[in-house]
Image: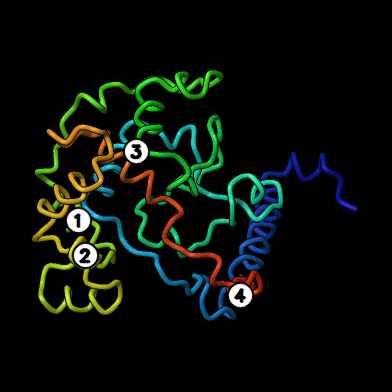
Amino acid sequence: MIKHESIETNAGLLIALTLIVISIGGLVEIVPLFFINDTVEKVEGVRPYSALELRGRDIYQREGCYLCHSQMVRPFRDEMLRYGHYSLAAESKYDHPFQWGSKRTGPDLARVGGKYSNEWHVAHLVRPTAVVPQSVMPNYPWLLETELNYSDVQDRMRALKMTGVPYSETQQEYEANVTTFGADIAGRLDILRAEETLMQQALTYNYDGQRARITEMDALIAYLQVLGTMVDFSRYDEGYFTQFR
């Protein structure tokens, strides 16, 4: 039997055994993937973010929200009782980068969409302790005061299009999105109409309560309100998702 001391004092042997262990672990993880047709669940409703939601996601990342909030409900009973159905890979297929994470100074936000009103989000972001007295989250009052810069939103959408997100620039791409997502959503995914649809969504839903202007608060709340709302889980039996594991 090889003693630990013999392994630890012999660099060559330690490297060889380490490579063997890593190889075995890698094979255990990689080989099963060759026997699975698809690891992304086939569900309806998942779509790319609209121009306003996309800018909100950019602000979410800029402000470091992901450092305290995860967006991944794990398949454990306690998490599902608190947050809802566990997260699917399909829900993040248009996220670049995804926001899963494991750090939870604050609660997971994967299913926060529709859980609170727009007014609650405004109050919470301006001064979190106003609605959650025990919160350690910092204040973000400038979001309500800063007008949203969306002059480069088309370039942002084009960059994501290069990664495979189906934003459209041609009539053919637009028609394909109409078939896949419906006319209303396809319009919001049209790069050439990005500024128009962004303004339309912000004014229609008035996320920040100020109709006179479009603020960064509008964009961030638009993003938060869509999280976890795209898939109607009542349409699927629990056993349906096991085939993709």
Residue that label 4 marks:
240
Estimate the spatial distance between the alpha carbons at disc 1 and disc 4, rounded to whole Å.
Answer: 33 Å
Judged by depth in the image, the label closer to the viewer, 2 or 4, is: 4
Q: Of marks 1 and 4, which one's residue comes earlier in the chain? A: 1
Q: Of marks 2 and 4, which one's residue comes earlier in the chain? A: 2
Q: Which mark is residue 157?
A: 1
Contact? badges 1 and 4 (CB < 8 Å): no
Looking at numbered disc 2 in the image, what kind of residue is underneath it? Tyr
Looking at numbered disc 4 in the image, what kind of residue is underneath it? Tyr
Looking at numbered disc 3 in the image, what kind of residue is underneath it? Gln
The residue lying at 20 percent from left, 32 percent from top is 210
Contact? badges 2 and 3 (CB < 8 Å): no
Estimate the spatial distance between the alpha carbons at disc 1 and disc 3, rounded to whole Å.
Answer: 16 Å
**Crowd around label 3: few <14 · some 14–19 · many ≥20 (10 Å):** some
Q: Of marks 1 and 2, which one's residue comes earlier in the chain? A: 1
The residue lying at 18 percent from left, 78 percent from top is 175
**Crowd around label 2: few <14 · some 14–19 · many ≥20 (10 Å):** many
Residue 16 found in image quarter: bottom right
**Nearer to us in this view, 185 or 76:** 185
Number of labels in the image equals 4
Label 4 element class: helix
Contact? badges 1 and 3 (CB < 8 Å): no
Percent x, y for residue 43?
Answer: 47, 72
Label 3 element class: helix
**Crowd around label 4: few <14 · some 14–19 · many ≥20 (10 Å):** few
Looking at numbered disc 1 in the image, what kind of residue is underneath it? Met
Residue that label 2 marks:
167
Quarter in which the C terminus is drawn: bottom right
